[in-house]
Image (cartoon, rainbow, N blue to C red):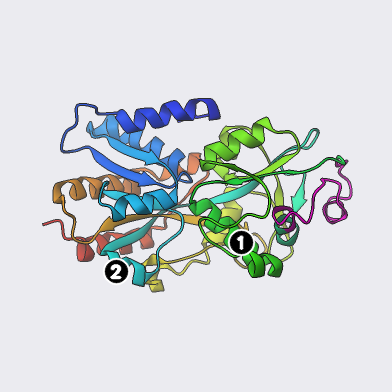
Amino acid sequence: MKFSIMTRAAVVALAMTVGAAANAADITGAGATFPFPIYSKWADAYKKETGNSLNYQSIGSGAGIKQIQAKTVTFGASDMPLKADALKKDGLVQWPMVMGAIVPVVNIEGIKSGELFLDGVTLADIYLGKIKKWDDAAIKKLNPSLALPSTNITVVRRSDGSGTTFNFTDYLSKASPDWAKTIGADSAVEWPVGVGAKGNDGVSGNVAQTKNSIGYVEYAYAKQNKLTYAALINSAGKKVQPTVASFQAAAANADWANAPGYYQILTNQPGDASWPITAATFILMYAEPADKAASVEAIKFFDWAFSKGNAMAEELDFIPMPASVVTLIRKTWADSIKNK
């Protein structure tokens, strides 16, 4: 499914109202904007195959966690995984659904995708407000052959509670001691500078409309909306472009089998080919659901996505979960979610 900044609102409206003549097979969820492109694509195909609807509110990870805690949806979705103690406290079960990547996006006249290189320290200094112009010496040192303008940088960041922000700030914390000391990693932080925008789509739209700006979005948003992305220098000191291969290289480091509650953070992974801001996105459901019929239907959808949705995920440059991990997840469903 192709989507753009201008059409996404309509797509969300469709996702939220499809199946207006509600039936027991409608599935309700809310949360992360990071996986919205693939959840939307899966929902469209699932509706055509089964007639059942996915009503997914793309409202941000923080809001998705609150919705599942309030029991207003059958599942929540978050790019910031909850730790095992938090899951136990709320009676929730968590698993990873798909993996993807976050990319810096810029709007600089004459600069094409992948031409501008940044490292973690420089990116952090831009978001700390220490680097204010595109021709700053630190940026020029990384890009000696680029003609960078002597213009102020407009920093764009998320205004809502966001798993994308969690992974972005987690990366900055690992790459920059200054960032770790002063800001840290969370789904919402006290930004030193910048213009706030809601959702990956909001950041995409703001960067697209603002000259000399920088933001961070899930890669599918950059690709589908034809935004200019920056390349990065990873923890091994290697220059890497955002590609399926570099996302897979980072994702290969995950040890899902030994992670309580599947808690894994994939930022700043080792390896010459690893993209440094790779992330998984997670589903949250109740171990003892109040509406067992709705819980069954949700699991049917996720099982279908694991069985038939991999090619669709790859078309949008998401990384499907390995077959061995899907086997573990299906066992988690059987052992932990009481749908009978």
- Callout 1 amino acid: Tyr
- Residue lying at 22% horizontally and 37% vertically, measured from the top left: 26
Mark 1 touching mark 2, by CB under 8 A?
no
Side of 305 relative to 130 (left or right): left
Q: Residue at x 35, y 59 (%)?
A: 95
Q: Position of residue 168 (x, y in %)?
A: 59, 56
- Which residue does the image show at 40% across and 68% down from the upper left? 83
Q: Estimate the x, y position of residue 210 in percent, counting from the top left.
A: 70, 33
Residue at mark 2: 89
- Mark 1: secondary structure: helix
Could you tell me if residue 248 is visible in this image?
no
Q: Nearer the viewer, residue 11 or 328?
A: 11
How many C-alpha atoms fall within 10 Å of the one at disc 2: few (<14), some, or many (≥20)? Answer: few
Q: Give the secondary structure at mark 2.
A: helix
Residue 285 part of the magenta-drawn span: no
Q: Which residues are magenta?
A: 125-148
Residue picked out by circle 1: 171
49 horizontally vs 279: left or right: left
